[in-house]
Amino acid sequence: MRRLSAIFLSILLIFGVLTACSGKNEQTIKVGISSSDTKVWEFIKQQAKKEGLNIQIVTFNDYVQPNLALSDGSLDANAFQTVSYFNEFKKQRKLDLTAIGSTVLAPMGIYSKKYKNINQIPDGATITIPNEASNGGRALLLMEKAGLLKLKAGFNGKGLTEAIASNPKHLKIVTVAAPQTPRSMDDAAAAVINNGIAVSAGLSPVKDPIFKEDKTAKPYINIIATQTKNKDNANLKKLVKIYQSPEVSEYIKKVYNGGVIPTVVPISEIENL
């Protein structure tokens, strides 16, 4: 009996040593994300575990705190924002943050209950866009690409109707709070709606827009960011590689039914946007 107890104790000690070694080898990084991306990041967490990387997910419901938490060291990385928003935010707040990899493009779209084709938008029609400079400017760029208007030379994507140089269809551009853009379709000819807001309103970013962004909308690609001093950290580089893997890409397409586009862009291009 004593012999069996000794053997059992030895097994427990060996298991404890192996567990301790395993824990020692596993690296933990804390990543801030938007609460709407939890499902994808749980999958990424599983994939990272195979690579000896433990991801601690921290969710946020706003677009301000994730960058502030990253700046003060509460996070090792975050992944929730476009290049355009990131560059403007860190400039305004004087934050020493850096993008280290691209993730996805969540295409903004032009939606309408009245028209099936962008060319059907009539002269003098009303179109609603988000009422803040970043998403409003993005909406105007999309409208320009759709051939609805022309913007002033050198427009940097941050601004509202003052950026319009030519409006050949005499469109009435009305700014509303971004969450209200889907509801505005009841009265307007069309509305320019952010991807996440469209999904929340029951719209399909794949099937419903009469015109939408594609991969050429590089300033609106989403990124993984960190403190500049940590940009060459091996574990963060591993995180980017895992996110950009074929397995994660396929999972993202499945979860969002094609409404979000996995996008790999060289970091040198992101830095120049």
Image (cartoon, rainbow, N blue to C red):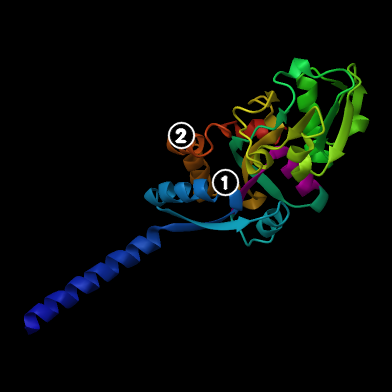
Mark 2, residue position: 250
Main secondary structure type of the part rendered in magenta: helix
Residue at image location 60% in from the left, 56% down from the top: 59
161 or 227, nearer to the observer = 161
On the image, the x and y values in percent for residue 119 come to 76, 15
240 w.r.t. 149: above or below:
below
Q: Are marks 2 and 1 in contact (CB under 8 Å)?
A: no
Residue 34 seen in the current view:
no
Amino acid under label 1?
A: Asp
* Quadrant including the N terminus: bottom left
On the image, the x and y values in percent for residue 190 come to 78, 28
- Mark whose residue sits in front, 2 or 1: 2
Mark 1, residue position: 232
Q: Is residue 258 left or right of residue 54?
A: right
Residue at image location 90% in from the left, 28% down from the top: 172
- Is residue 80 covered in magenta? yes
**Tag 1's secondary structure?**
loop
Q: Earlier in the sequence, mark 2 or mark 1?
A: 1
